[in-house]
Amino acid sequence: MNDRPVLIFDSGVGGLTVLREARVLMPDRHFVYVADDAGFPYGAWEEHGLRARIVELFGGLIAEHDPEIAVIACNTASTLVLGDLREAFPETPFVGTVPAIKPAAERTRSGLVSVLATPGTVKRQYTRDLIGEWASKVHVRLVGSERLAGLAENYMRDGFVDEDAVRAEIAPCFYELDGRRTDIVVLACTHYPFLVNRMRKTAPWPVDWIDPAEAIARRALSLLASTDQAAPQRLDLAVFTSKAPAPSMSRLVKGFGLTHVAR
Ligand code: DGL
């Protein structure tokens, strides 16, 4: 029996898209969800400062929660700091979330793919390397959105989203070349799947939207020791680095079955 939690980390509510899938695949595990809401949005951070911040945060999180595994449910963080985390905490297995460029390149029929992400993820060398490695025969457009993560965050907390803003943010993903047009948009920020219905509604033509949450949860499951006994009933926890999240945020995580603990 393994009583150690699965830790899921993001800058805000985006990692809940991964938690949702992880719960389905690992109903017997318990979870600690960490939102670095004091650092949100990660997309706008300068790389050196963000890297140092996340490694330092993990020192405290690992000491406090002793997770069996840590899932970085954030592209902006994973493409920057995964290597540093593995080096700093060799005892903890880390699962990252990186833009799903390989499946998109395998699946596209038109050969035109867009990767929709935060400005941070779009800038990363890691993202460029993924394109070079897996999608050299495909046309990949990187679209950095300043606003979508915030729009998703507000939508989840307050239930409202400005559809015109969503339309404007996704518009650059849609392009045509030699009579062909984009047929896949990679959702390379864990916040975006929460807005996918609005994206479908405001898109100029239908495309496949790739949401990697299930694949990430499967990867995490594959690294966990198997258990034949259910872990004792324990509460799934939510930790906010701001220490005092907005009431709408506390309500939201409660709706996901998480109990907010002050850290
Ligand atoms: N959810 C994060 C990601 O997957 C980023 C949101 C942000 O903090 O800007 O990239």
Image (spheres, grey):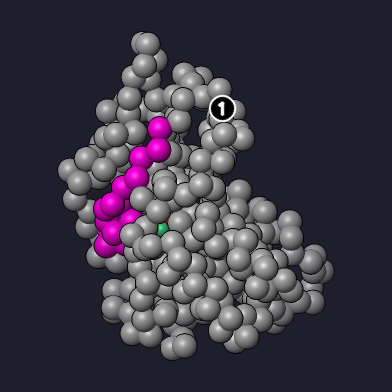
Of 121 and 258, the residue lying toward us: 121
- Left or right of residue 146: residue 91: right
* Quadrant of res 63: bottom right
Is residue 189 among what the camera can see?
no
Tell which quarter ligand 1 is in: bottom left
Task: Count the labels in the image.
Answer: 1
Task: Give the labeled residue for mark 1.
Answer: 136
Which x, y percent locates residue 133?
A: 61, 35
Which x, y percent locates residue 206?
A: 36, 27
Which x, y percent locates residue 234?
A: 61, 82
Looking at the image, residue 243 lies above or below residue 18: below
- Left or right of residue 69: residue 34: left
Question: Which residue is found at the position 37% from the left and 58% from the top?
Answer: 43
Which stretch did the figure color magenta?
141-155
Looking at the image, residue 9 lies above or below residue 215: below
Q: Note whether ligand 1 is within 8 Å of mark 1.
A: no
* Quadrant of res 67: bottom right
* Quadrant of res 249: bottom left
Q: Is residue 144 magenta?
A: yes
Looking at the image, residue 159 lies above or below residue 145: below
Q: Is residue 56 magenta?
A: no
Of 201 and 122, the residue lying toward us: 122
Looking at the image, residue 55 lies above or below residue 121: below
Question: Which residue is found at the position 51% from the left and 78% from the top?
Answer: 57
Is residue 88 among what the camera can see?
yes
Amino acid type indicated by mark 1: Ser
Determine crowd level at label 1: few under 14, some 14-19, many 20+ residues with C-alpha closer than 10 A. few
Which x, y percent locates residue 212?
A: 53, 47
Question: Which residue is found at the position 23% from the left and 39% from the top?
Answer: 167
Mark 1: secondary structure: loop
